[in-house]
Structure formats: C-alpha cells, structure tokens
Amino acid sequence: MINYYHFRRLAMLGAILALCVVVLGAYVRLSDAGLGCPDWPGCYGALTVPQSEIAIQKAQEIFPHSTVETSKAWKEMAHRYLAGTLGLIVIALVAFGWRSKQHVRVSPLLPTALLLIIGFQAALGMWTVTMLLKPVIVSAHLIGGMTTLALLTWIAHRHWGSFNKSVAITPALKLWIRGAILILLAQIFLGGWTSTNYAALACTDFPTCHGVWVPTMDFKDAFHLVRELGQSANGGNLTLPALTAIQWVHRIGALITFIYLGSLALQLMKLPTFRKVAWLLLAGLTAQVSIGIANLILHLPLILAVAHNLGAALLVIIAIVINSKITESN
C-alpha cells in the first residue's frame, strides 16, 4: 500500500506543478523570453545561465548571432527546470502505478501515456527554440501542456475527489459534459494561434473589429499551419487581413465557448451535488471573457495576458473535475 500512498500524493503534486509550468510557460512566451537561450536543453552550452563576464563572453563567441540577456535566459531556464521536475514526478507515477496497479484508481497505462506525452512535449520545447518560434510548434506545445495538466488533474481527482454515483446523469447531459473538454481545447488552440502569430492586437476595438462586425480577412494565410513566424504561405509578410482573421475567429470561438460552457453551468446548477462546481465554472468563464476583453482595450498588459492563460488552465481543471465526478470509480 505504500506505493499507493506515494502515487496519490505525487498525483496531486504533479497536477499543481503542471499548472505552474503552464502559467510560467505563458509568462516566458509573453515576455519575449522564449528564445532567451538559443540552444536546448542547456543555455549557451551550459546547464545554467552564464553570469560572469568571462562566461558571457564565451557564450557570445559560441553563439555570435544571439545576444546574451541573462534576465530572459533565467526565465527560460526556470521553466525548463520546473518542466524537468514535472517529468521526474511522472516517471515516479509510472513506477508506483505499475507496482500498485491493484490499488490505484486509474489504469497504470494512463501515467505511462502521460510520460510519452511529456517526452513529446520536451521535443516540442526543443523545436520551439531550434525552429525560432514557428507558430504551429508553439501552439502544439501549448496544447501539450494543457493536455498534461488535464491528465494529471484527472489522476489526482480519481484519488482525492468525490464521485456522484447516486445522481442520475442523462446521456445527453453526459455527452454535453464530455464535449466541454473538446470545446475548451479547440478554443485554447485558437488562443495560442492568436498569441504565437502576434495577432492579439490585430484589431483593438470591441465588440466590432476595425469598426465593423465582419472586417476584411484573409483566411488562407491566417490558418496555413506549416509556415514561418510572420510569413504567409508563399513566404511573404503576413498581412493585416490575415492577422485580423486569426483574432476574429478566436473571438467567435470565445462566444461559442461562453454559450456552451455557460449553458452547461446553468444546467448543472439544477443538480444540488454539482451546484458548487457549476458556480466555479460560471465564475471562471465570466472572468476569462472579462480578462480577454480587457486585454484588447488595454493593449495586452503582461499581467492580464498571463492571467488569460491562467484562466484557460483553471477552466480545463474545472471541466476535468466535472467529467471525473460523473465517471464511476473502479
């Protein structure tokens, strides 16, 4: 049983740490520190940030095309250290899960799959640096981080949360709850695509865009996935209509998400055992939309931009908890 108790504690620690990794990753990206270290997994050829004058000079000689900025490099390395620690926790979950598979409340295949996802996340992190912030890589890295958070939240809730066996959940409501995860992940991808293409301020008025409801847009270049940062499909500069299309679609996605999750929250409030989590969902959803609007009006202040990513992560946690609560325990 000792392996089970280790597994249980590590699952909660992993979920908390995954939330920290997601938010710190957003802070690194939004503060333009994503290329604070030009190599991977180290920084300028070392396991830590060059500090002394000699170390900085040596780093500059090895990477002549990069300027050593220690503040940005430390942000990037802090994120890597934290993500590395999370990887070690997941390795421990895999080991304890298989040793105590008769007692843990999830299949040991789940933490094993999670370990593979984290390995792929590490590769995406490397490609983010080596491919110079290519939008599809950075966006995929965001989705991978949210998926990691979702799976760790699921594992933690199966061991710490409560389940509502006595509540009659209709098949339609159950499908509605399951769909919330897909809606959220799709909207998070659109948000990541908006951010990684620097389209968040493509139009700064609200609720209209450039003073109209349907502005001039270029969807072909906007959602051409395999291209370099700031470039169109044919290699030219990404135009304002393309950037506008990215942000406008993100707005439409936000509206759909608000209606879908808001309606789900109101429906769940009718069930006494779900009332508290339904209020949390509605409050988180309202806060997220408010922060998104404030980011537009205030021209994307760093604290609000990071808070917007935190809000998305918290909505993922709430959606996973609701899904876990309607799933019978083994």
Image: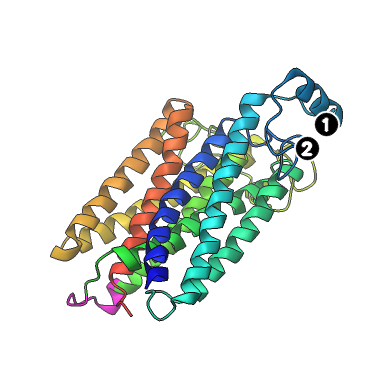
Helix, strand or loop at disc 1?
loop
Classify residue 217 by image quadrant: top right
> Which one is in front, 234 or 168?
168
Q: Which residues are magenta?
A: 165-173
* 42, above or below 313, in the image: above
Q: Position of residue 160 (x, y in %)?
A: 30, 63
Find out whether residue 212 is within the magenta segment: no
Position of the C terminus by quadrant: bottom left
* 71, above or below 228, in the image: above
Classify residue 169 by image quadrant: bottom left
Mark 1–mark 2 distance (CA, rounded to whole Å)? 9 Å
- Amino acid tagged 2: Gly
Circles 1 and 2, Cβ within 8 Å, touching? The answer is: yes
Magenta residues, dominant SS class? loop
The label shown at residue 169 is none
Q: Position of residue 264 (x, y in %)?
A: 28, 61
- Amino acid tagged 1: Phe
Residue at label 1? Answer: 63
Residue at label 2? Answer: 45
Residue 157 appears anywhere in the view: yes
Residue 131 appears anywhere in the view: no
> Total label count?
2
Find out whether residue 167 is within the magenta segment: yes
